[in-house]
Image (cartoon, rainbow, N blue to C red):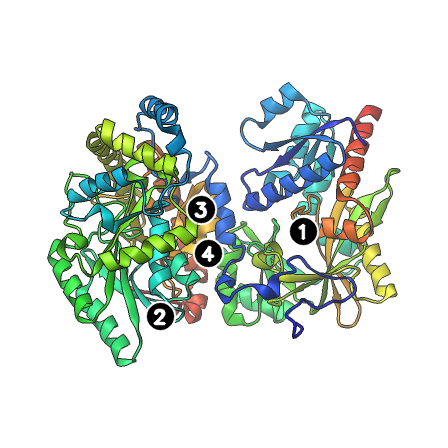
Amino acid sequence: MSDRWVAVLAGGLSHERDVSLRSGRRVSAALRSAGVTVEEWDADAGLLPRLRDHRPDAVVIAMHGGEGENGSIQTILDLLDIPYVGADPAACRRAWDKPSAKADLRRAGLQTPDWVVLPQSAFRELGAQPVLESMVARLGLPLMLKPDQGGSALGAQVVRSAAELPTAMVGSLAYSDAVLAEEYIDGVEVAVPVIEDADGTPRALPAVEIVPESGVYDYTARYTAGLTTFHTPARIDDTTAAKVAHLAVSAHRLLGLRDVSRTDAVVSRTGEVHFIEVSVSPGLTETSLVPIAIEADGGSFGEIYAGLVDRAIARSQKR
Amino acid sequence: MTTSGQPPERPGARSLDPHLQRYAARAAGMTASEVRALFAVASRPEVVSLAGGMPNLAALPLDFLSEQMASIIADEGMTALQYGSAHGVPKLREQICEVMALEGVTGHPDDLVVTVGSQMALDLVTRIFVDPGDIVLAEGPSYVGALGTFASYQAEVRHVVMDEHGLVPEALGAALAAADQAGRRVKFLYTIPNFNNPAGVTLAVARRAEVLEICDRHGVLVIEDNPYGLLGFDGQIYPALRSMDSDNVIYLGSFSKTFASGLRVGWALAPHGVREKLVLAAESAALCAPTLNQMVVSRYLATHDWKGQIKSFQTMYRERRDALLAGLEQHMPAGCTWTRPDGGFFVWLTVPEGVDTKAMQPRAVTARVAYVPGTGFYADGFGSRQMRLSFCYPPPERISEGVRRLAGVLSDELELLRTFGPAMSRVLSGPQTPAPDTA
C-alpha cells in the first residue's frame, strides 16, 4: 500500500495518442486499486505549469511514441526534479531509435535481423529504384519495413514482393523521415516484459507468444480484443525460453533501461532468438502484453506499478 | 474453433475476447483502425481539424436556452422527465411540419416520427426495408454514417456517380437497369440532395423530377436525407424531393445542424403505411426520443427567432467556406480539384493521381492538420484520391492555416511519389473513380 500520489501522463500529440490514453486509463485504475492516489494528465501545453504547481510525488509515463519515449518528457521531469517510473532520457533515446538499439545489441553479440536504415532523402538523391534493388539484394524477400522510430506497428509492413516495396515505402515514410528495412524472420513472435525487482535487478517475466488471427500483428490485431491469441508462457522449450529471457534482460541492461521495458523478439524455426525492438514505455491497455505477462506471472499489475512508483521516489530521495 | 462455438481451451492460451466466435456476421468490420486512432490526435487544439463535421454552436443564445430549459423542468418537469410516445411529442411534430414547409413539404404531423437524430431515423428505415443481401443505392461518395448503417444490416451498397450538379440520372438509370437485369432487388436510393456530405454538391433542381421518375419506374423507394437543406449560404432553399413526391419518398430531417447536435433530435416523414412500422421500430429501438430534448427544441422553435438564428449560421459557415476555398486556390499544388459548395459543411478534394489520402494521413497529423480520407465514403474501396474537408468548426484564420499545412503535406507527398513514382507504376492501379468535381 502506498500513500503517494501520482500523475499518470497520457495522450500527447504522437500518432499513438489513442493507445496512450487507453494505457493511461488502465494503469491509473490499476494504481488506484493498489491504494495509490492518481491523477490523469494529458501531455499538453498546460503540463509544465501543472507539474510545477502541483508537484506529484512521482509520474508514470503512459505516453507512447514521440515525446513519451524519446526522452523529452523524461528530460522535463529531470529539470523539475520530479521522480518518474522508467528510463532516463539518454537510455530512452537509445531505445527509441530502433537502428541504434539494434546496433548496440549486435555489438554485444546478440542476434538481430540484418537491417538497412535509410532516410527519405537518400531515395530522392540516389534514385529509388537502385536503392530498393540493393536493399532487396541485401535483405532478401520477404522483408520487414517500418519507420525507424515509433510503435504500435504503425507504418510497419511485411513486404513479400519487390512490386509492393515502393508503396510500402510511402506508407512507412508517412510516419517518419527514415525507414528501417529488416530481414524477415519467420518464426514465433514473442514479447518479454522486464521488471526490476526492489533491489533494481531486472527480471524477465514469462514470454508472451503472439498469434494474430490474420498472421500479421498489425494495429488492428493489437487493439481489437480477440483478433490475437496470446500464449503465456510461450510455446517454446525451456532452453529457448531461457534464451529469450536472457535477450530481454540483456537489452534492458545494455541500453541502460530502468524499472520496466518490453523486448519484442522472434524465435526462428531453427530456434535462434532475434531481437526486434525494445519499448521503454510499453503499452498498458486491455490488449497489451505487459499486463498479460504480469498476470501470467501471478503478479498484480497495480501492485507491480505501485512498487515501481515507490522505487522512483526512493531513487530521488537518495540523490 | 470447436463445434460448440466455444473458444479452444488450451493451457496458457488466451484470447482477450472470449465471445469472438459468437458475434453476428454484421460485426465483422468492427475493429480498431489506424485511421480512427489518428482522429484522437485531431481533437487536440494544436491540430487544425478539417476532419469532423461538428456544427459550430458559438452563435447559439446559451443564456436564453438555459432559462428555457430551467423553465421546462420547473413548469413541465413531470412530463419532460417521463417516458414519452415513440411517435414523438405532438406539438414538436406540428412545428417540424412548419420547418419542412420552408422546403415545400406538406406533411401531416401524424406521418412524422421523432427520432434520436436523423441517424436513428435512417437506422429504422433500413431496419424495416432491408434484408441481408438487398441492394441499396447511394451517391458516390456518400455519408459514412449511412454506409455504416447499411453495413450493419448487411446491405450491398452500390454507388451512383455524381457530378457538380449532383446525382447523375443516367447513371442512376443504368444502375437500376443492371440490377433488374441481374434479377437483384434494389430496396431504395439513399440520397443527400442538398450540400451533400461529403461531396458538397447539390442535386440540380432540373434533375430532381427525373431522379424521382426513374426510381418510381423501377419501383425503388427514395430516402432523402436533408440535414443541411436550410444552410444555403445565399439563403436559397431547394425544393425537397419529398415536396415533389409524397408517396415514394421518406424524408429524414434533423435539428443537429440548424440548432443543437447534442440534443439528438431528428425525424422521419414517411408515407402513412410506412409510418406505422417506423413507430413500432422506434419503440423497440429506444422506446422514445428523449422527451426533455424534444420539449427544448419545441420551446426554442416557439420562442426564439430560429429563422434568424439559421441566417446567422449561414453567414458564419459562408465565411468559413470562403476561407477554405481561398486557401485551396492559394496553396494547393497543380493537379488538385475540388467542389465549391453553396451551402452545408464540406468540400470534396481530389488530389493528383498516385496520392493515397489514407496513407498520407499520418504525415498530415504530424503537420497538425486533419482531414477524412475519401475511402471512408465509399463501400467499395474507391476514394483513395479524395478527401473530405470540413469548414464548419474552425474559425476562418485557422482554416486558412490548416489549408496551408495541408498543401505542404501534399507537396511533400508528391515529392515522395516523384521519388518512388517510376517504381510504383505497377501498383498504382488501385480503385479510382470519378469524383463530383472531376466526373
Res B235 → quadrant: top left
Q: On the rendered structure, is B98 left or right of B355?
A: left
| Badges 1 and 4, same chain | no
Give the amino acid type for the residue marked by disc 4 in the picture. Answer: Ala
Please give the residue where the numbered disc 2 appears in the rendered image. B134
Q: Position of residue B340 (x, y in %)?
A: 22, 47
SS at mark 1 in the image: loop
Lower sequence index among marks 2 and 3: 2
Mark 3 highlights which residue? Answer: B364
Task: Tell me which residue sits at (59%, 67%) in the image.
Answer: A214
CA separation in Å, label 1 and label 2: 39 Å
> Disc 3 marks which amino acid?
Ala
Residue at the image point whose x is 38% and y is 23% from the top: B74
The residue pinned by badge 1 equals A288
Label 3, secondary structure: give it: helix
Marker count (numbered): 4
| Chain letter behind tag 1 | A
Please tell me if label 3 and label 1 are on a single chain: no
Of the pair A128 and A295, the residue shown nearer to us: A295
Note whether B258 is above or below A114 in the view shown. above
Q: Secondary structure at mark 4?
A: helix
> Which type of secondary structure does the marked residue at label 2 adopt?
loop
Report whether mark 1 lies on the same chain as mark 2: no
User: Residue at label 4?
Assistant: B359
